Image: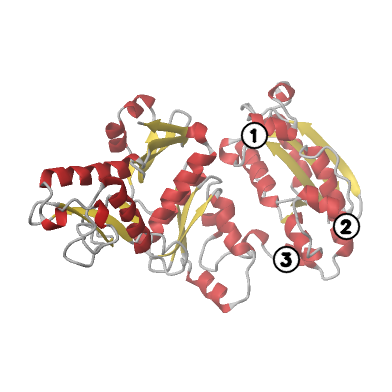
Amino acid sequence: MQYAIVDIETTGSYAAANGITEVAVVVHDGMRVLHTYETLVNPHKEIPYFIQKLTGISNEMVADAPDFEEVAGEIYNLLKDKVFVAHNVNFDYSFLKHQLAEVGYELNTKKLCTVRLSRKILPGLKSYSLGKLCHQVGIPLTNAHRAGGDATATAELFGMLVAKDLKGEIQNMLKGRNKEQYLPPNVPAEQVEKLPMMPGVYYFHNAKGKVIYVGKAVNLNKRVKSHFSNNKPSRQKQDFLKEIHKITYTECATDLMAQILESTEIRRLWPSHNRSQRGYIPRFGLYVYEDQNGYKRIAIEKNKNVFKPVYTFNTIIEGHNRVRELIQEFGLCARLCNLARTDDCSDSMYAEYCEGACLGSEDVEKYNTKIDAAVQYLQEQLPTFVLLDKGMGRKEQSCILVKQGSFSGMGYIKNENVLEDIDELEKTLEPFQDNDYIRNLVFKHANDFPEKCISYE
């Protein structure tokens, strides 16, 4: 049996929209290297700056390199009758399979992943990334992040794994139809293979079509497969696998949009196998209402579906603390803020701030103006901004809107002129229900990537 040990460099993380910049193949018989092949490839796409820095492969280096079609035949002949081996094999295999199919070659070989093999044959290591793994086991890795250097190191690692494979792990992984061996019994292999390699949300359905699990992915294809790659024999895992009959998905332009959609869908569908994120909906809100005497009052109540709160809190204590700040800052009546237990504020610890609204002696209009100022103060602390990022196509951008501190909606825009009017922008986006979990995601992303933000005064 011969093995083709492969490494590639690419312009991006998924095959459908990216190209290969370098390919290396080391033919191995399990004991020694029989043949090596290495070539740069012109991807006819710009290589992102950070990838140029990582690999050292620039646009100028590949400008005169052969197109993939020119070398496809030779690469296919090196791979077709051998076991395809790579470190994180699904990445390399998916790119080459996609690129070969584009020029008329159908790659359909057995695969071995040296990451998974290393975890089985060399357990207990701190890291199984190629560089750190090679360092731990004493394999020299020169010219890292270049196809030739990584393939050579992977070949040496594979030789070590073969020599140390006393339990027959390699043959076990090659038994049967490798690509289907861990899939749920009721899910066709083609359904999994067709999943795109891009961000999105996936849904597992039972025999009746009901969604039983929702997840998000940076790479839908790889994430869904990861659910089945370590097929534990526990009853819980086996029952879960038997229950899955269909997989559907929704593509997203970015990982952040996928996280937002996942959170929204879990709350909309309440899938039986999802356990996380169910406690993130804010439980309390600050509401303003008018009493029979015309005075505006403040109350902290559990969130109500029919009324929108001025502010939201996870606990009632947080709400009361914020109201106490408003009382002191704006001279509000503790009784009309529902924090005084008596009919007036005379015995309240906040008596000094009350000007008689609880007794009806303060002018209604004057007091209500203070309430309005307090509400405005809260809302002014809540920012309005948009997060712009890549879209589904070249001519559009993804857009996430936060309005007065609340997540409002997201979608895609093709004309940046719409950003000039926040109300018009809001109409073009799909509305979403705000919650603390999503809001924290968006604010963290905005803090990490301020260059993606446009703020509104």
Q: Position of residue 128 (x, y in %)?
A: 75, 55
Name the image quarter holding the C terminus.
Answer: top left
Which residue is painted at 29% across and 57% down in the image?
285
Comes first in the chain, label 1 or label 2 = 1
- Say the numbered circle drawn on residue 160: 2
Mark 1 and mark 3 in contact (Cβ < 8 Å)?
no
Residue 19 visible in the picture? yes
Query: Would residue 189 appear left or right of 251 to someone viewing this image?
Result: right
Q: Quadrant of residue 263?
A: bottom left
Pointer 3 or 1: first along the chain: 1
Element type at mark 2: helix
**Nearest to the observer: residue 112 or residue 425:** 425
Q: Amino acid at mark 1?
A: Thr
Identify the residue under disc 1. Answer: 11
- Residue 10 lies, with reference to residue 347, above or below; the image says above
Between tags 3 and 1, which lies in front? 1
- Please give the name of the residue rendered at 15% of the width and 43% of the height, measured from the top-left corner: 366
Counting from the top left corner in percent of width and height, residue 349 is at 29, 61
The reply, left or right, for residue 91 in relation to residue 124 is left
- The residue closer to the viewer here, 38 or 338, is 338
Residue type at tag 2: Met
Quadrant of the frame with the N terminus: bottom right
Q: Is residue 251 visible?
A: no
Q: Which residue is mark 3?
A: 175
* CA distance separating discs 3 and 1: 34 Å
Q: Residue furthest left?
A: 293
Q: Position of residue 282 (x, y in %)?
A: 36, 58
Q: Indicate the colouring scheme.
A: secondary structure
Residue 121's place in the image compared with 97, above or below, is below
Q: Amino acid at mark 3?
A: Lys
